[in-house]
Amino acid sequence: MDYLEIEGGHKLKGNVVISGAKNSALAVIGATILSDKKIVLKNLPNVVDIRTMLKLLTMLGAKVEHNDTEAIVDCSTINSTKAVYEIVAQMRASILVLGPLLSRFKECSVSLPGGCAIGQRPIDLHIKAVEALGANVELKEGYVVATAPSSGLNGNKIIFDKITVGGTENALMAAAMANGVTEIINAAKEPEITQLAQMIDMGGAKVEGIGTSRLTVHGTNGKALEFKEPIEIIPDRIEAGTYLCVGAITNSEITLDRVNIEHIQTSINKLEEMGCSFELAENSITFKPASNLKGVNIVTTEYPGFPTDMQAQFMAVATIASSESLIEERLFENRFMHVSELNRLGSDIWLKGNTAAVRPVKELNGATVMATDLRASSALVIAALAAKGTTKIKRIYHLDRGYDRLEDKLSKLGAKIVRKRD
Ligand code: UD1
């Protein structure tokens, strides 16, 4: 199995080009099912999750040409509406085919998802959303089997009692080809939702309220969507935030290119509180390290609040700050698996319920650690870059799911990082 070997303690310098957002690309790929014409997707990150989602489309019968950051997807040939366990178990986001398959083909069965082990992560809200549009949903032998009325899904009010990114995405895609108008209330507002809503709007199902928590979708009454222009995936705000944390922990000046600054504002704010500074330009940002890195208090919440997907990386940085940090995780109940691994590198982190107290240590020391989920893995990379000596990070298939060319990008900045095999 592959592992990463990182020799820590080196100062880095240079530019990193930020890739397309994995989470946006996954939803966009799901939405291609709503069209029976070819669609060109650009700026895809070259990561395993994207290849898995494209493979899922292929298994449904779509034609996919994929080359690095571009794909041409033709969903006119879809001849199956079953998302099988073998694929869905690899990646929870496969559930994103539920809404579009049901909307266009009036039936589908999707295996219950697997994915990151960061809590129970139910899909009840996805199911409630399609039920609100008239779908009949049953759980049979580990599959969600959903059927729309023969005349198609019917527009309705979907009220989410909890904000859910994936649930909002499925609701948007289910509403796109439904009959009449759907109102999605308490919708998630993440930039990935905005990209998906804009795509659906451009495809012919008018969407109002984009960027707000109340989305109105004018369904096309069964007409397939038509995307005329190539769809360019937005920059990955979590990848960008991760490289800012790399700069903070290694005390290095790093410039991020092709970044949307508004999307990473909360990470910028927290790093400023820690004493770091920034130079902003259009689509690029230069990180300047702190002379005295201070502790910080963080509470994860929905966008535009502080993202849960950046919690682990900030915790890694906080380990060597000069004062204590408190980090509260509000979205997922089991998202602290990196704590014990960071402590193996010499950090002093204490957990009580969903809050971590990070007490500063003078230095981290290299050790062998295990990646447990995608963002936890990147926290270990960040910590390893600052740790004295060599760190081996095992189970890096988690990292490969979501970080495009991680070793290349870090090596170009001057990091000593190599991929090896046991
Ligand atoms: C997405 C992101 C993930 C990010 C998360 C929160 C993708 C592919 N993944 O995940 O990286 O960490 O948003 O920003 O875009 N919930 C339910 N029932 C449901 C659905 C969700 O109770 O049916 C709960 C979850 O357990 C969690 C909370 O709602 O506690 C938020 O989850 P959600 O926003 O749905 O996350 P994902 O879409 O899975």
Image (tube, rainbow, N blue to C red):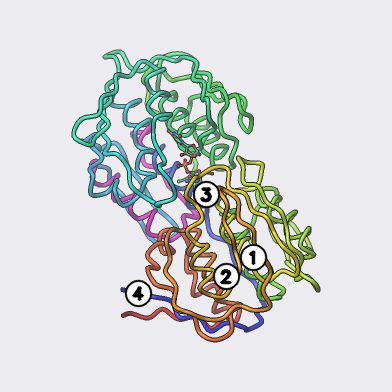
Mark toward the viewer: 2 or 3: 2
Location of residue 147 in the rendering, given as x and y in whole percent from the top left corner: 27, 21
For mark 2, give the secondary structure.
Answer: helix
Disc 3, SS = loop
Give the extent of the magenta segment: 33-60
Q: Is the C-beta of the residue carrying label 3 under 8 Å from the nearest atom of ligand 1?
A: no
Question: Marks 2 and 3: CB-CB under 8 Å?
Answer: no
Residues 415 and 37: in front is 415
For discs 1 and 3, the disc positioned in front in the rendered view: 1
Label 4 lies in ligand 1 vicinity (Cβ under 8 Å) = no
Distance between the Cα atoms at labels 2 and 3? 26 Å
From this view, report whether residue 56 is shown above or below residue 413. above
Q: Amino acid at mark 1?
A: Cys
Residue 38 is one of the magenta-drawn residues: yes
- Which residue is denoted by mark 2 in the rendering? 382
Mark in front: 3 vs 4: 4
Disc 4 residue crowd, few under 14, some 14–19, many 20+, Cα 10 Å? few
Q: Tell me, for residue 233, which label it has, or none.
A: 3
* Residue at (31% x, 80% y) in the render: 422
* Amino acid at the residue labelled 2: Ile
Q: Which residue is mark 4?
A: 2
Q: Mark 4 or mark 1: name the one nearer the start of the chain.
A: 4
Q: Earlier in the sequence, mark 1 or mark 3?
A: 3
Circle 1 sits on which residue? 245
